Amino acid sequence: MDIKQYMEQLGQRARAASRAMARADSATRNRALLLIADAIVRDAALLRAANQRDLDAALAAGLAPALVDRLTLSDAAIATMVEGLRQIVALPDPVGEISGLKFRPSGIQVGQMRVPLGVIGIIYEARPNVTVDAAGLCIKSGNATILRGGSEAIHCNRALAAIVKEGLLAAGLPADAVQVVDTTDRAAVGALITMPQYVDVIVPRGGKGLIARLMEEATVPMIKHLDGICHVYIDAQADIEKAVAIAHNAKCQRYSPCNTMETLLVARAIAPRVLPALAKLYAASQVELRADPESHAILAGYPHLVAATEEDWGTEYLAAILSIKVVADIDEAMDHISTWSSKHTDAIVTENYSDAMRFLREVDSASVMVNASTRFADGFEYGLGAEIGISNDKLHARGPVGLEGLTSMKYVVFGHGEVRG
């Protein structure tokens, strides 16, 4: 069987399963999620062993440290997967919710019902936890899904797929509601993104190269973001203790996620006081600072200091590298963000209410924060249980995509025999 034929079979089975998922009641879908969570706890040792096989192969292949970090399924990551599933169970079920019912002069009553999207194709690199997060959200929202994980996580994804299938069947749901593509052939991606007859939406979670390719080739609509060029702006009226803690955490808590700060903007009035304090913390983590002339002068003597270039402002490093720029005020900061931000997540640190509200209103990003680390831009942290991805598009879904982002609205009409004259 060739790849195209194999993928079409997955699509046909997913489409059939999507109808069963849409009519399944909330209790059944929740039961499947709890059974999957329990099985992950039960099989944690098997999952770690499968993940170790993937890690060994990744290290032998010289995979980049950021990708190895994403690939690693630690005890904490397993616990987070389980907690994410249980949080999803606790969330209200959006499917079937009717809102906005209004009587029209004709006598009919018109409203909108929230319904599943249908079949969701998810393409991701490394991150085996996405297999569970995505499956959980799709099951809860009444969708079927086809998951195409990266070849570097194939062993772990196969083990997780078996667990998910077991939970679905035990709850009385079709096993085909969640299918993991069981081939590492790149042609599978090309087939998945060009099957609009079977797949309703594609969610890519991966590097810039993957998403750029999908933007060129896909004939199925996508929920996506291309880059995570996130900014923290430290305002002239910031609390220095807060600013230091936030700017350090936003960069150093983890380097590989898309919500990690890549550029630090500092108001000129406060830069001589806040930058040296931050530099000490960055030095301890061996963060390379790519500084504009003003911040370079303030940080003279810092061991990992280089001059920033124009290219740095538009680079997502995913590494221990940070761009720094001194700006005159909030207006210059927002101008810089408008020019260089990928519209993912941007934050301001300030005690000035007016500046905070201006930043919230005027910065055109999916997540905009006041006095908080950009690392909070995450479905789990936002109370979504888990996220299927992050969107910096403006249509349908924006920011972390949870349950509601995996549904759409259709109009429903209740009549009493009315006919139109």
Image (spheres, helix red, strand yellow):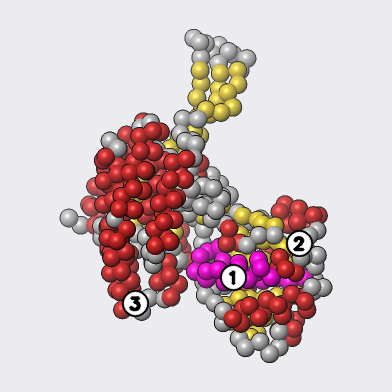
Choose top left, top right, bottom left or bottom right for residue 140. top left
Crowd rating for badge 3 (residues with CA inside 10 Å; few <14, some 14–19, many 20+) = few
Labelled pair 3, 1 in contact (Cβ < 8 Å): no
In this rendering, would 271 be left or right of 105?
Answer: right
Depth check, front residue: 148 or 350: 350
Which labelled disc corresponds to residue 59? 3
Question: How far apart in space, not on screen, are marks 3 and 2 (Cα)?
Answer: 43 Å
Magenta region: 244-267
Picture disc at residue 251: 1
214 or 392, which lies in front?
392
Sequence order check, earlier mark of 1 and 2: 1
Residue 299 in view, yes or no: yes
Q: CA distance from mark 1 to mark 2?
A: 18 Å
Q: Amino acid at mark 3?
A: Leu
Q: Is residue 15 magenta?
A: no
Residue 106: percent from the left, percent from the top?
59, 13
> Mark 3 to mark 1: distance in Å?
25 Å
Q: Is residue 163 above or below residue 346?
A: above
Pointer 2 residue: 350
Q: Residue at horizontal 26%, vertical 46%?
A: 166
Question: Where the C terminus falls, by quadrant?
Answer: top right
Which residue is painted at 55% across and 68% down in the image?
253
Q: Amino acid at mark 2?
A: Thr
Q: Are marks 1 and 2 in contact (CB under 8 Å)?
A: no
Please determine whether, in this image, residue 391 is positioned above or below residue 263.
Answer: above
